[in-house]
Image (spheres, rainbow, N blue to C red):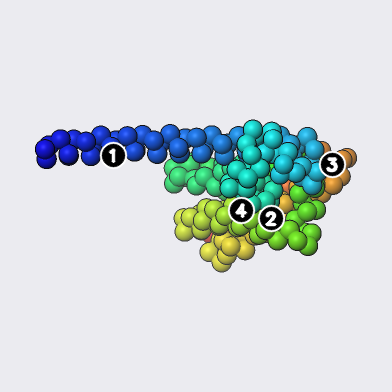
Amino acid sequence: MRYKYEHTSKLEFIHERRNMSLRERKKKNTLDAIVLSARKLFVEKGYRATTMGEIAESSDVAVGTLYNYFKSKSEIVITIVSQDSSDLLQPYTRAELDALEVEELIWQFTSKLLGFFASYPRKLLNELITVFWETGQEGLSEGLVSIDLLIMNRLTETILILKEGGRVKSEVEPEIVSLALYGMATTAIMMYSVSPEITLEKTQETISAMAGHLCRGILPDKKEIQ
């Protein structure tokens, strides 16, 4: 009897685990469908014009189910931006840092940053930047700022490693440099979002030029390295 009880308990445990796995997969599939549908609607209609009802209908879920996953459109946007910014949050290995010049590292970062912002249609990008500053959009603003901070923290960590290796001046403050670089890049990107005459290529040139000036201020003289 004891063997039968233990055997039955194990089978019940396995069955429960299997059901849990199926529930988790279904939950993830629903989440992915919602995010994908919202992304498509935001691109087609814009952020303001898209309703939670439309997102639910496009995702083939009930409105109540949608609100179980996201309390607002802003939460969906934050999820989308978080997913899209993952490449910017990937840390460099020591080997990768050693293989690249500082200027090339900064160029890579700014190129990734520009590619991240440019992955959104200019009209949607401009709308999100505008909504960011509106009263009542604190949830969206705080969420996007938290992503900005994660990206800047990753950049700060990289500059700190370079500083420890003597590849930037000893008096350089990594947090200030990352803030300056991120601020210059995002300013150029905001200008791109509101000015149709400014191309991506021109924006990249502007960011590269600003980054070049920054590098000349933080890189040690050759005699300091020797």
Viewer-side label of 1, 4: 1
Image point (43%, 34%), residue name: 22
Q: Distance between the residues labelled 1 and 4?
A: 40 Å
Viewer-side label of 1, 2: 1
The numbered mark, 2 or 4, whose residue comes first in the sequence reads: 2
Q: How far apart are marks 2 and 4 (CA)?
A: 11 Å
The numbered mark, 1 or 2, whose residue comes first in the sequence reads: 1
Q: Distance between the residues labelled 1 and 2?
A: 42 Å
Residue nearer the viewer, 115 or 82: 82
Residue nearer the viewer, 32 or 11: 11
Mark 4: amino acid? Ile
Which residue is situated farthest in the bottom direction here? 171
Compared across the picture, whether 122 is left or right of 30 comes to: right
Q: Is residue 40 above or below residue 68?
A: above
Task: Determine whether the residue tagged by mark 2 lies in a helix, strand or loop.
Answer: helix
Residue nearer the viewer, 214 or 49: 49
The numbered mark, 2 or 3, whose residue comes first in the sequence reads: 2
Residue under numbered circle 2: 140
Labels 4 and 3 touching (C-beta < 8 A): no
Q: How crowded is mark 2: few (under 14 residues within 10 Å), some or many (20 or more)?
A: many
**Location of residue 214 in the rendering, given as x and y in whole percent from the top left corner:** 67, 55
Image point (69%, 33%), residue name: 58
Mark 1: amino acid? Phe
Mark 2: amino acid? Leu
Residue under numbered circle 4: 147
**Location of residue 46 in the rendering, given as x and y in whole percent from the top left corner:** 79, 41
Q: What mark, if any, has residue 13 been given in the picture?
A: 1
Residue 110 in view in this figure: no
Residue under numbered circle 3: 198
Image point (58%, 46%), residue name: 69
